[in-house]
Amino acid sequence: MPDADDLPHVLRSGRAPNLRRRSVLAGQAAASSTEVESALRVPADPTSAAFFDVDNTVMQGASIFHLARGLHRRDFFTTRDILGAVWKQTYFRIVGVEDPEHIEASRASALAFIKGHTVAELEELGEEIFDEVMASRIWPGTRALAQLHIDQGQRVWLVTAAPIEIARIIARRLGLTGAMGTVAEDIDGVYTGRLVGDMLHGPAKGEAVKALAEREGLDLARCSAYSDSFNDLPMLTLVGDPCAINPDSRLREHARAQGWRIRDYRTGRKAARAGLMAAGAAGALAGATAAAAAIRRRLR
């Protein structure tokens, strides 16, 4: 049990219950908004599934950055709007939970730039932006891992802090079961600029996975989860088969200590850019083959 001095300021200040409620609400909202069209078929393995983070795990870079850049090019919002949001989000990433007031401002501005726009408008533009800038940034190795789960009769969900609308598009384009993402409040199909609960980040991802597992009858001990970030430990530690994909230094260290699988496709991406497509494809295939063996051992 950590000493009181080791706890983040927000926990010592009595704000933790409120943050906990927001994480739970965000997780429940994400789970209830999950796209299930491709999950209507009865899966061959109904109690086992896989959960994939998106940014730097499935896709190179941040999906919300690619989305925001595409929306800005279409005059969806002003440069001033996005600079303000980027500053608050950058500060939040650096400072973490040490400044509750700034976190509140960051949370409030997270998707404020879509205020007044319609859900249908964001979905339509999201389809265009995926084709323009996101499709080419999908990591082939991670895509192969997701397909392995599908081929084994398991369902696969994306779990991301990106807006649920763009998360659904990515999942649908990759042929996955569905997605859970940050839910923005809308009234009669028009965004209010507020979030439902909080961003689907850190603890909220864990809450989303738990809520979905309960709804779908999943045995989390038989499930897999993939992420690049130490911040996703709440999701990774829920399942029996966690895997670090393109991990940051803290997650790599933790994964090694716990004996988790580690896959890094970043070198393969650089090789592909240099024109070594065959080498990149072989690396992805080798990684997928090794992953298939590991997954089968876990499921036996």
Image (spheres, rainbow, N blue to C red):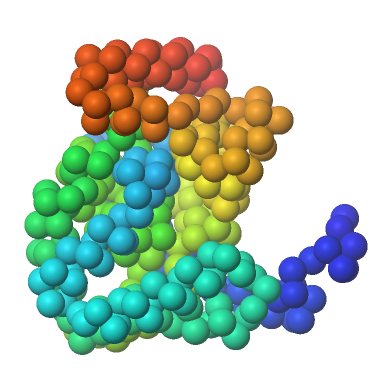
Out of 101 and 163, give the one closest to the viewer: 101
Quadrant of the image for the N terminus? Answer: bottom right
Expressed as whole percent of the image width and height from the top left, the position of residue 70 reads 17, 63
Figure quadrant of residue 199: bottom left
Expressed as whole percent of the image width and height from the top left, the position of residue 243 reads 52, 32
Out of 41 and 184, give the one closest to the viewer: 184
Residue at x-position 25% and y-position 42% = 137
In screen coordinates, is 286 left or right of 6?
Answer: left
Residue at x-position 31% and y-position 34% = 139
Q: Is residue 220 above or below residue 35?
A: above
Expressed as whole percent of the image width and height from the top left, the position of residue 214 reads 49, 50
Residue at x-position 44% and y-position 19% = 291
Q: Is residue 203 above or below residue 49?
A: below
In screen coordinates, is 195 left or right of 139?
Answer: right
Q: Is residue 124 above or below residue 235?
A: below
Query: Among all residues in the image, which is located at the extreme front?
Result: 274
Question: Do we see residue 7 in this rendering?
Answer: yes
Residue at x-position 22% and y-position 14% = 278
Question: Do we see residue 210 in this rendering?
Answer: no
Expressed as whole percent of the image width and height from the top left, the position of residue 179 reads 32, 51
Figure quadrant of residue 189: bottom left
Report the number of numbered marks: 0
